[in-house]
Amino acid sequence: MTISEELGKLRVEASTLRRRFADTWNAWQQQKQKNNTLEDRVKQLEQEKRIWEKERQGLKGTIKDLEDKLAALTVVKDTYQGMIFRSSVEKSHGNSRSKKRGGQTGHKGKTRKKPREIDCEKDVSLTHCPDCDQSVSQTHTVYERVVIDIPVPQAVTTKYIIQRQWCGNCKKEVCGIPQGTLPGLRFGMNFLSWLLLQKYRMRTPLAKITELALSTYQLKITEGGLQKLLGKLKKQLAHNYQEILKEIRKATIKHADETTWRVSGQNHWCWLFATNKAAYYTIEETRGKGVPQRVLKGSPPDAVLVRDDYPGYNGIQAHHQSCWSHLLRVSHDLAVLSYVSDEMIKLHQELTAMFQELETITARPFDMAHRQKEYAHFTTQLETIEARQYRHRDSQKVQTRIKHQHTNLLTALLYQNVPLTNNHAERMIRPMAVIRKISGGSQSHEGASIHAVLMSIVQTMSLKKQNILDTLPKLLALPGQGYTLDLEKGE
């Protein structure tokens, strides 16, 4: 083959290679463009992924909050289930209610006993037959029927003709104050006692008391008139209110609690300080520690204050007993959640067992040496709980509460008749919470002060098992009333 032929052949191959290279280059450019497009799409998808991940995390937190709320509502539902409505037919193992309602077969029935004292007797007979209207004759055959009823009350209005007399020793005019009355008031002790009974024991609103006074005693009085009477009573009983405070301060075992109260639409706090025989209420603008420090000032050095875990009581100079009911309520609410940790369940069981042991020990006769030994044992047990490395938030929350209270949970072991819970204060402050829900609070600071004073008087009477209708006139009796002669006209 000649050189020219070789060159021609090489030119053809070179031309072919150039075409193939051009095609390959074009294909590579197209592929590169596609690759760039895909890389842009990947970046876009990654950005969208990050956005969705953030939204997922937010939804996860929302779901957790909703689960907490659902669990809390479930606890409330389980607590109050059946308290309002209950099906008339309950299923038990697939059958209808196995235990019938009412008295069971074989149980001895109970009826009201006949009164031993009879106030009056009446003979009852017919003159005519009630069926045919024919006259009937009298007989000596009878049977007895005892009926208890109440008299129809009627307000009694009394005019007192009061002598203006002269005391030769004092060189001044003196006048008697009628028994069962207070100066400047047109209502007697019985009505004032009834008013306190309705307002602070029956928790009846003033509007309903005016209606009750009219329908029961045919006595007209406005809500404003009732409020003025309550204000007068507050002034007359101010000394007794201070005596209750002194009694609280002197007590060696006392309870404290607080709840919200509204005054003129503003948030205030109702504080309670109580013993087994007295209750002292005060309504303050603050929930600060200064209130309990002021109220309990001058308490004995060996006094024990039973309280919840509110830090405002920490500065009180007394031995503190923290309420186990509050601690166990928190641990129980966490232990019944659907996502509760195993260590939280074990911690709740441990605290429940500890409380049951403490209840058993405090119920026994007081033995100081034995109590000190038990105190050391339970102190070690609390310190063990406080030192544990809990990994879950629920158990850490309860552990923190225990650390804050520490041996305050065990003070009842070292002092006689000290309860492990603050249930007494809870019961004493509940009437105020009920009145708050009914009335919405007080419309003025003076109204709040009246409410605190009179509620303290009435609740203390209740704790001492004193009848308001009998006790209040004695508290309101004025010096010198014993010398007053009340004689009916003509005597």
Image (tube, rainbow, N blue to C red):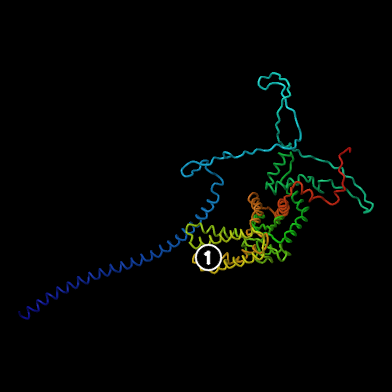
- Image location (x, y in percent) of residue 44: 36, 65
Q: Amino acid at mark 1?
A: Gln
Tell me: residue 290, above or below residue 234. Answer: below
Image quadrant occupied by the C terminus: top right
Element type where label 1 sits in the image: helix
Residue located 65% across and 38% down the image: 111
Residue receiving disc 1: 396
Q: Viewed as shown, does residue 489 lie left or right of 362?
A: right
Image quadrant occupied by the N terminus: bottom left
**Most foreground residue, 32 or 427:** 427
* Quadrant in which residue 417 is drawn: bottom right
- Image location (x, y in percent) of residue 79: 55, 51
Using a 10 Å C-alpha cutoff, classify the residue at mark 1 as few (fewer than 14 neighbours), some (14 to 19) or many (20 or more): some
Tell me: residue 208, above or below residue 16. Answer: above
- Image location (x, y in percent) of residue 192: 76, 46
Residue located 75% across and 51% down the image: 231
**Most foreground residue, 94 or 107:** 107
Q: Is residue 288 visible?
A: yes
- Image location (x, y in percent) of residue 120: 76, 33
Tell me: residue 487, above or below residue 310. Answer: above
Q: Viewed as shown, does residue 85 lie left or right of 113?
A: left
Outermost residue to the bottom: 3
Outermost residue to the top: 134
**Most foreground residue, 157 or 456:** 456
